[in-house]
Amino acid sequence: MSEATQKSNQKRESDSGDSSSVIKKLKLEHGQDPEAESSKMEMGFEIEAEAAEDKGLRQSMEDAWVVLLDGSLGFQGKLRCAHFAVYDGHGGRLAAEYAQKHLHANVVSAGLPRELLNVKAAKKAILDGFRKTDEAILQESAAGTDLIFYPLFMIPLVFVANIGDAKAVVARSTSVDNLQTGSDEARLLKAIVLTREHKAIYAQERARIQKAGGSVGSNGRLQGRLEVSRAFGDRQFKKFGVVATPDIHSFDLTEREHFIILGCDCLWGVIGPSDAVDFVQKQLKGGLPVTAISRSLVREAVRERRCKDNCMAIIILLRHK
């Protein structure tokens, strides 16, 4: 498939008003055969992931996402990881598309260590990859995008990096003992927010903005315009303290983690983390596949709860062996 055909197909998918799962898009961009790759990744347990999107009442879709079950990108050191991300574009789609296509490659080329066991080196590679991506976007586009979640899965580690105002939420069992006994309480999942929002109105972010000579208006926006305080691109706001430096942390995956939901601020503006976890869990109990659940979650946000903005979500299901 030619590059022009790929872009055309992506535009038709993104401009559609229907929530849809379009997992093959990123696989084609990385030169992979979507028919040859399973939707599961075996690493002590199985990972299944699907994305869905809906443009809401917007004229076009400015957001982008990544579902990459094999995140090695042909790395010869036998790098083993999976990569997922959601990019919430603003002021256009160019920055979101650029980050979608290049951020992970930039992180890998920055020296992401094999097996991701060297936490310090992995975090440095993520920081360097973010910086390189932001510099490239600033040369190409004035538009901006905030990345909500950059997870790298390598059992037992998950690395989480985020900039912007959307969220990633993990569904975690309340007790290991309950899992072992198989009691009903084991199915009670707690929603744990994995990301910290970066908004200009928050004290830590406001302080950096003011130090750089910027201001936060009464509407909570930087220079009265931009709500997020960290983003890729947004050239005109960089001098006022907008940075692309992510918060990064890592954690071990255990039998207590069941699934992760990634979503833009539109999704979380109408569905709380606990509601979203309950929604997904209920559909999983009903036997629905991840593809249907991701579509249903976005549909719930846009059509039932009246989210008007672009909306997208990724559900990453962790099936323990």
Image (cartoon, rainbow, N blue to C red):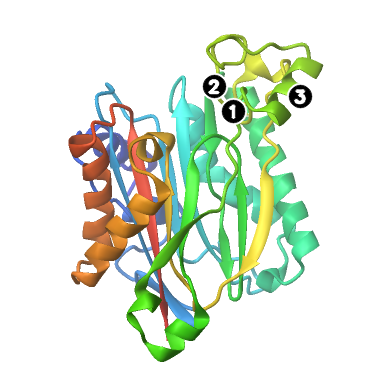
Please, is residue 181 above or below residue 88 in the view?
Answer: below
Q: Earlier in the sequence, mark 2 or mark 1?
A: 1
Q: Residue at x 56, y 22 (%)?
A: 141
Residue 43 visible to an observer of this rendering: no
Separation of marks 3 and 2 at Cα, in angstroms: 14 Å
Residue 265 appears left or right of 36: right
Question: Mark 2 and mark 3 in contact (Cβ < 8 Å)?
Answer: no
Q: Quadrant of residue 71?
A: bottom right
Q: Residue 227: which numbered mark, if any?
A: 2
Q: Upstream in the sequence, badge 3 or badge 1? A: 1
Q: Residue at x 23, y 63 (%)?
A: 283
**In the image, is 69 to the left or to the right of 136?**
left
How packed mark 3 is, by other alpha carbons closer than 10 Å (few <14, some 14-19, many 20 or more), is some
Residue 199, disc: 1
Camera-nearest residue between 83 and 256: 256
The residue indicated by pointer 3 is: 208
Q: Is residue 121 above or below residue 136?
A: below
Q: Residue at x 23, y 36 (%)?
A: 305
Label 1 environment density (alpha carbons within 10 Å; few <14, some 14–19, many ≥20): many
Q: Is residue 3 visible?
A: yes
Instruction: Determine the secondary structure under disc 3.
Output: helix
Where does the image place residue 188, in percent across and percent down from the top left? 38, 69
Q: Is residue 13 above or below residue 112?
A: above
Task: Find residue 4 and report its horizontal and vertical position in percent.
Answer: 35, 37
Residue type at mark 2: give it.
Glu
